[in-house]
Image (spheres, rainbow, N blue to C red):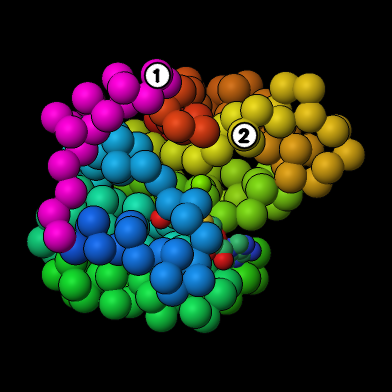
Amino acid sequence: MDEELERYVTALFAREDRALQDARTGHEAADLPAIHVSPLEGAILEVLLRAVGARTVLEIGTLGGYSGVWLARALGAGGKLVTLEADPAHAAYARRTFAQAGVQDRVTIKEGNALALLPDLSGPFDAVFLDADKAPLPDYFAEAMRLLRVGGLLLCDNTFLHGKVVGGDAVDPDVAGMRKFNELAAHDPRLVSAVIPVRDGLLTAVKVGS
Ligand code: SAH
Ligand code: MG
């Protein structure tokens, strides 16, 4: 997106309060990679979750909790965000983020490798947001489909993989995982899918059948 246009719509539609702004701008000082969703993408996540009346959401890849705050707030009081994170330093930062944003009561951070944690989870979830490592995305797809209710949302960040889904090295496990995931999401008869071309691409799908 043109930078000036992105600034324009972000200022109008993706306003951050102090907690969101501090969480986002604090990544670098805390040695976290600044690979969180953009404010506009956060606002889009919130609109999508509210559109399906989501009360429960599963996130894979917490980082510092920036996307998690948008997700948790979209659920309203009494909602439940379960978010999986492998790196203890990221989880610790996220815990502070959720407390500062006042959503700690509706968030459970599960620390560990998502591939190991997912089989122990039971659904149904109203939405699943995939935003961790890319090589295992075909496995995350299968688990997400198991955990999602019919009518629920499958969301996945980095559809474009910074441009590498086209012309990238097919033996790169991240490229292979992302491409395979995109093909699964595009062709699965249980899903109606599209991509919102915000930032690095956001796969957006509704589970229409079991
Ligand atoms: N959703 C976050 C950004 C996530 S960045 C936001 O927008 O604010 C990706 C995160 O996934 C990193 O914190 C990384 O540590 C975590 N991660 C990577 N591989 C993982 C795995 N196999 N299991 C759990 N977390 C993982
Ligand atoms: Mg991402």
Residue marked by disc 2: 162
Residue marked by disc 1: 2
Q: Position of residue 90 (x, y in %)?
A: 47, 73
Q: Position of residue 6 (x, y in %)?
A: 31, 26
Kind of element beneath mark 2: helix
Residue at position x 79%, y 29% from top? Answer: 168
Type of residue at label 1? Asp
Residue at position x 25%, y 63% from top? Answer: 22
Residue 135 visible to the viewer: yes
- Sequence-wise, the earlier of marks 2 and 1 is 1
Residue 121 visible to the viewer: no
Q: Is residue 65 above or below residue 197?
A: below
Q: Is mark 1 within 8 Å of ligand 2?
A: no
Nearer to the camera, 123 or 64: 64
Q: Which residues are magenta?
A: 1-18
Q: Quadrant of residue 51?
A: top left
Q: Main secondary structure of the magenta part?
A: helix
Tell which residue pokes out farthest to the right in this image.
Answer: 171
Residue at position x 52%, y 60% from top? Answer: 33
Which of the two discs, 2 and 1, sits closer to the camera?
1
| Disc 2 from disc 1: Cα separation | 16 Å
Q: Is residue 59 above or below residue 160?
A: below
Q: Is residue 97 above or below residue 208?
A: below
